[in-house]
Amino acid sequence: MNIPDTKHPRVIVIGAGFGGIRLAKALGNKDVQLVLMDKHNYHTFQPLLYQVSSSGLEPDSIAYPVRKILKKYDNAFFRMAEVSRIDTEQNYVETNIGQLSFDYLVIATGTKTNYFGNKTIEANSMPMKSVPQSLDIRSLILQNFEKAAIADSEEEKKAFLNFVVIGAGPTGVELSGAIAELKNNILPDEYHDLNSDLMQIHLLEGAERVLPPMSEQASKKAEGFLKELGVLVHCNTIVKDYDGDIITTNTDLKLASETVIWAAGVTGTPIQGINESAIHDKTKRFKVNQYNQIEGYDHIFAIGDMALMTTEDFPKGHPQVAQPAIQQGKLLGKNLLKLVKGESMEAFHYFDKGTMATIGRNRAVVDLKHLKFGGFFAWFIWMFVHLMALVGFRNRVVVFFNWSYNYINFDKAARLIIRPFVKHK
């Protein structure tokens, strides 16, 4: 891998997500050698992936080069690599570009889409966990608009214009609202030969309400906002199958659709070599203690979505969102430096800054510890928080410009089919 030998302890961090990047910054120019690995050479701001999928933003406005983040740290190295195995006895990682030894290892790989074992849904629906997947969704949406315009029968047009989002968590709610804005603002103006009333957006949720992790107040407001936009919400509805044409559910609901987006859950991505007893059976997350050490290891850690740290306040582990990963990455950086010096580590305590979701223009919901609200002010706060959380000044400027343009012109400027998506049936 051409990583130089060093007299300092080597810390390998696998994953350049929120946790991995925050940890890297905490160890930058400190008395350790930092090696950050990721299969992509960029950090992705995942909360805005849905805007890439719905033509609101281009991918380069929510992605940022990892090497640019690390350039001011002389002790930091980046390698674009996929880790296949960890040797916990000899302390090295095996990757597609070679192997490398470590003194301390941090796993921050995040999660992948969970299809709950349904292979036909996995084969025929669209996931949205990465930039390439979001671009595929965007291409498919726009391609189906074009196919609907030349379809002969109304039934065929409806299939192309039937958009189904499965899972009404923040991702599903935000994506449904964004697609509804395409229907309300783009189709009537630019597809004069299409009856926009034929387009339907269905949001399916297995629980009894949308946004199950948030308060009932937020759920009610969000569902009201979705219905205002024309989204058809189906709660207590579990998808049984999707063969590429027809969705079947646990109810009488059957939907013909060419575009089904799966946002119904995630699962961990454990790496081979870690003791099976340290992996939670259902979530596939690593069981960690209050210092983020993986169960059974004192030099191997997990942070973010992959870390299952159970506490009295969070008996099922911390929520799999950005803040726990960022806070764990920051503290683990300090703790690793303490370990190197032979000092005691500090236990992690999560500070819950609240939860929010946006449902289109002027519509959002916010849950804080002692305050819950929705509407324009919540939407403004959502925009400000996400804008400031983006990595890089350029990305903030580009996103702010796009949002301003969209707000003034009711337009989504990124409606380009750069790389057509081929759906295999």
Image (tube, rainbow, N blue to C red):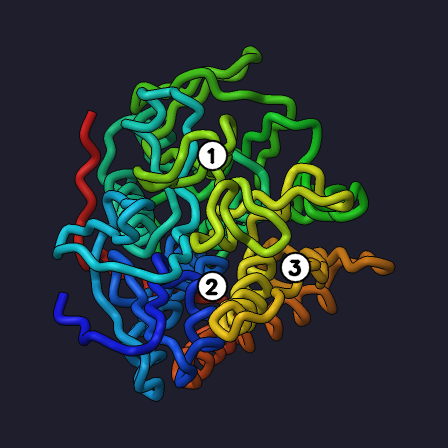
Label 2 close to label 1 by CB (< 8 Å): no
**Label 3 neighbour load within 10 Å: few <14, some 14-19, many 20+:** some
Secondary structure under badge 1?
loop
Secondary structure under badge 3?
loop
- Pinpoint residue 152: horizontal percent, then vertical percent: 24, 30
Q: Residue at x 70, y 59 (%)?
A: 349
- Pinpoint residue 99: horizontal percent, then vertical percent: 17, 55
Q: Is residue 230 visible?
A: no
Q: Which residue is mark 3?
A: 348
Give amino acid for label 3.
Phe
**Label 2 neighbour load within 10 Å: few <14, some 14-19, many 20+:** many
Q: From the viewer's perspective, is the residue at label 2 or at label 1 nearer?
A: 1
Q: Residue at x 30, y 52 (%)?
A: 91
Q: From the viewer's perspective, is the residue at label 2 or at label 3 nearer?
A: 3
Q: Is residue 187 left or right of residue 407?
A: left
Asked whether 47 or 138 is in front, the reply is 47
Q: Quadrant of the C terminus?
A: top left
Q: Which mark is residue 18?
A: 2
Q: Earlier in the sequence, mark 2 or mark 1?
A: 2
Q: Is residue 266 visible?
A: yes
Asked whether 211 or 14 is in front, the reply is 14
Give amino acid for label 1.
Ile
413 over 84 or under it: above or below:
below
